[in-house]
Image (tube, rainbow, N blue to C red):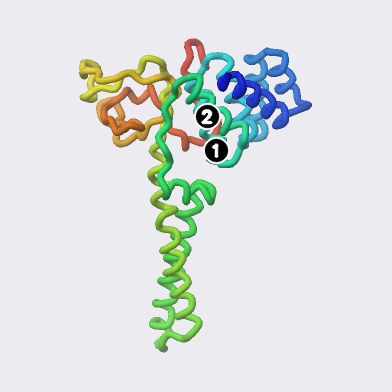
Amino acid sequence: MRPLLLSIFLALAALAHGAGDAAQEAYDRGEYAEAARLWEERAARDGVDSGLLAALGNAEWRLGRKGRAVLCWERALLLDPEDPVALAGVRHARNAGGAERPAATWSEDYASLLPSGAWALLAAGALWAGAASLLIPRLAGRRQGASAQRLLLGAVTALVLCGPGVWGSYTRSERSVVRRSETSLRLTPTAEGEPVSVFTEGDVVRAGRGFNGHVRVRTSDGRVGWVRSGEIERIEGGGLPSRTEPGAP
């Protein structure tokens, strides 16, 4: 019953998100490949937003491309953490498809308060402001005045507040989606490495360093190993997910 209710919610939410356009009409008729094509054309023309990514994720899921669907939903949540279609899609993937998803840390939740990259820019601005409040009075050959002291205090406060956001943005950038079914987690970064487990397409892992055409990953339950670099795709890639199915451009 729960998967059925989630499917109904996905359809209703998608309708509310994009009622009246050709892509949504194609989706409602069950022409999911056509709907996906039209949404991709719109993305190429107008750019992506959370609504488009969430709707495209629904179409990709219906087409059986679970990894691409989850990646669309996850990227939609980067743009709008409260997007109802993307949230419903992620829940549906976990309940109906068995896809694993590591819980966000508190610093990642904190980082989601601002768009990706904003924390680093704010921290850089605060650092320069603090440096200016110290250096300008010295270069001018005078003591630091009250305004410079207030600027320094504000810069230090901003840096403290930006710290968790910068760290959360960094760890969040490690989150990646498994794009291929039957992807093996291996002990070593080689084709002959011993498989220790198998991922479900659409699983979310944390990706680390690369070596020998492989990437070191950590799963939601703490297992560590290696996968081929082409078998996962980082969520914070921007734009539409790549295509991995046979014959894709």
Estimate the x, y position of residue 144 in percent, counting from the top left.
Answer: 42, 85
Circle 1 — which element? Answer: helix
| Sequence-first disc among 2 and 1 | 1
Q: Residues within 10 Å of mark 2 (few under 14, many from 20)?
A: many
Query: Are the residues tagged 2 and 1 within 8 Å (C-beta)?
Result: yes
Which image quarter holds the N terminus? top right
Estimate the x, y position of residue 25 in percent, counting from the top left.
Answer: 74, 20
Q: Quadrant of residue 18?
A: top right
Which one is closest to the eye, mark 2 or mark 1? 2
Name the residue nearer the viewer: 199 or 96: 96
Q: Residue at x 24, y 25 (%)?
A: 189
Instruction: Please determine whether, in this image, residue 197 is positioned above or below residue 223.
Output: above
Instruction: In the rendered structure, find residue 190 and report the number of the disc placed on it.
Output: none
Disc 1 residue type (three-letter): Leu
Instruction: Please determine whether, in this image, residue 61 is positioned above or below residue 45.
Output: above
Left or right: 126 as drawn, with respect to 80: left
Q: Residue at x 52, y 36 (%)?
A: 238
- Pointer 1: what residue? 77
Circle 2 — which element? Answer: helix
Estimate the x, y position of residue 45 in percent, counting from the top left.
Answer: 66, 31
Q: Residue furthest top?
A: 247
Estimate the x, y position of residue 37 in percent, counting from the top left.
Answer: 64, 19
- Pointer 2: what residue? 90
Disc 2 residue type (three-letter): Val
Q: Residue furthest front?
A: 1
Instruction: Please determine whether, in this image, residue 147 is positioned above or below residue 7.
Output: below
Q: Quadrant of residue 10?
A: top right
Instruction: Please determine whether, in this image, residue 173 is positioned above or below residue 111.
Output: above
Q: Tell me the CA gap for discs 2 and 1.
A: 10 Å
